[in-house]
Each structure stands twice: as structure tokens, then as C-alpha cells.
Image (cartoon, rainbow, N blue to C red):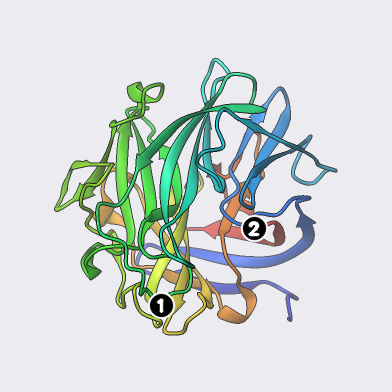
Amino acid sequence: MNWRGVISLWACTCSAQSIAMAPAEPIRLPGISDSNSPAHWRDGRIYIYQSDGLPIMTFGDSQFEFLKTRGVLLSTYERTPLWIESTWADDDGTLYAWYHHEQTVCANLSAPRIGALVSYDGGTSFFDHGIVLESGDAVDCSAGNGYFAGGHGDFTVLLDHERKYFYFYFSNYAGPLGSQGVAAARMEFARRDNPRDAVFKFHDGQWEEPGLGGRTTAVMPATRSWAGTDAESYWGPALHWNYHLNQFVMLLNRVCCEPGWMPTGIWISLNPDLSNPAGWSEPRQILPAELSGWYPQVIGLGPGDTDKQAGRVARFYMGSDSYWEIIFNY
């Protein structure tokens, strides 16, 4: 791979915004990230959760320094394997987290669900509130994508600026084609300690469908069903607030037209308002297939920056590794 120089792969001339990718000194997190890897700061240290069926806590003085790892304890292991994909640290130190759980439903296929956790000891142990987002569509054991027979998973949870709602942007692998792809749901901030039956999905312009079993309308619909061997869809959204652009940024994986979830590049979309699922810009490619893998996300470089907020320059990760800086301009 030729990573020399700066590769500018996307420019939105309509708003004079552009994204550039610049090769950088590699960062390799010590654990395996088979999902988004959420980060937060506590007492001057960064904490990153990496998951590969069970989560570990990776921590140190910064993402550039030597990082240590340790396992985390769960109040129950009934819903494993699980991957922690989003976190949010409250002002009092309480850490809220959300996980992707793969429930085996067929011989070789699972149907993911999304659950909620909370930690009162800085994130070394978690109480499991259980599942808060689950598909109501029947599983399809003949699905040809190689992994999932349906379900909801591969997601990000992000709090709005008003601290009114947590917004879930997730991958829907089930139901009619118009509901498959990237979908949305939300939960009132006030319900964070009591999340069961508190999440509502976006459907037909309203946030009224129950998180457990309700219908969805895709924000970015699949164009070929996940039930086939040739699925064509965005998936695995990773969101952050970019205070340089004054926009929310969504990084996306995309599969197209071949079995085995082969990457077709990394894509990006912008939206100033989390509460407006129709407001996301048409996704544009920022890395080609030959340079991409799974699970793109950023970790910002400014004081207090994480995977949830970043400025003009951030580190771009795919899985456990970062070989690039991502530069946001306008």
C-alpha cells in the first residue's frame, strides 16, 4: 500500500467541506477490536473498551502512550458473547455502556440484539440491564450473508447537545428491504438508569415504535437484502460530534454484491441534527476497498476528545489500528 503524502478522497463542493486522509505513525491498541471501541476520560487517563466476544478495558495517559489492558466483570454472562460499542460518562462518574449481543438462532447464524450496562466503579465492572433494542421480524435461517439471520446490532449511541435524548444509530439486518440498513432509535436521557422499555425506534417519521420488537424505517436503506449472498448495504455506523465542522459525522462500512462481507471502502455522511434522520448527507467514499477493513472510527486529539467528539484533525482507526489522520476542512 502506498500511504505517502496526503490523499484527499472526498470533497463536498456544495458546502465547501472536505475530508482528507494523511498517513501517520501507526497506533496499535493492545487488544482486539472486533467492533467500535468507545473511549472516555477519567482522572487524566483515557479508557478505551475493546471487544472480541468479551470486552476488555484498555487505558493509559493518551492513545499515543503505552496502554495497559484488563478484563471487566459483568453481573451476568447470560448474554454473551457481547461487544461494548458505546459508552457515556456521567458527571458523577457513573459510566453507561451499550453492547451488541449475538444470540445464536440457527445452526451457523445469529441474530444480534442491543443491551444496556452501567458501572459505578469507573468501568471495571458492569451491571447488565438487559436487552433494549431487538428486531420484531422473524429470523431467516436461509440468509446467505454468512453471519446474521436478522437482528439489530453494530451501532453507536450518542447524546444530543441538550442532554434530552440518547440516539441509537444501528444496523438492521431483518425485515422488509426498506427497513434494512442503517436505522435509528432514541431514549430519553432521564431514563438512563431505567432503560428497559425506554427506547423507541424511528419509523415513518415518528419515534414511537417500541425498541423491543417495533418496526423501523431505514435512514440509509439497503439496496440488496441481507438475506441474500449479494447484500448491498451500509452498516456499522460510528458517530461523533465534530466541533470544527459544527456537524455530526457518521463513518460507515459498506458491503456490496459478494458473500463474506467483503469491504468496499469506508464512507462518510454529515448531519447537523441527530434528531433528523433524513438530514444525513449522501455517503461519500473516503477510503477505497484496498485500503479498508471493518469498524472505522475516530479518536480526537484535543483535550477531552474521544470517539464521541473531535476537531479538525483526529486519528482514524479501523478495528484496533490507526495508520491515518483524518482531516476535516471547510
Q: Is residue 130 left or right of residue 198?
A: right
Q: Label 1, secondary structure: give it.
A: loop
Within-10-Å neighbours for mark 1: few <14, some 14–19, many 20+: some
Between discs 2 and 1, the one toward the N terminus:
1
Which of the two residues, 115 or 252, is positioned nearer the viewer here? 115
Q: Is residue 128 above or below residue 298?
A: above
Q: CA distance from mark 2 to mark 1?
A: 29 Å
Residue 169, image x, y percentages: 38, 50
Residue pictured at 34% horizontal, 21% vertical: 190
Residue lying at 41% horizontally and 48% vertically, measured from the top left: 113
Of badges 2 and 1, nearer the viewer stands 1
**Res. 114 visible in picture:** yes
Q: Residue 127 placed where, x, y %?
A: 53, 26
| Outermost residue to the front | 107
Q: Residues within 10 Å of mark 2 (few under 14, many from 20)?
A: many
Q: Dividing the picture into quarters, in which one does residue 12 lie?
A: bottom left
Say what amino acid the circle numbered 1 marks.
Gly
Q: Which residue is mark 1?
A: 144
Q: Nearer the viewer, residue 210 or 273?
A: 210
Nearer to the camera, 8 or 99: 99
Left or right: 190 with respect to 123? Answer: left
Horizontal side of 217 relative to 20 (left or right) equals left
Residue 246 shows up from this direction:
no
Q: Amino acid at mark 2?
A: Tyr
Residue 115's spot in the image, x, y percent? Answer: 43, 39
- The residue pinned by badge 2 equals 317
- Count numbered badges in the picture: 2
Q: Is residue 31 above or below residue 211?
A: below
* Label 2: which secondary element: strand
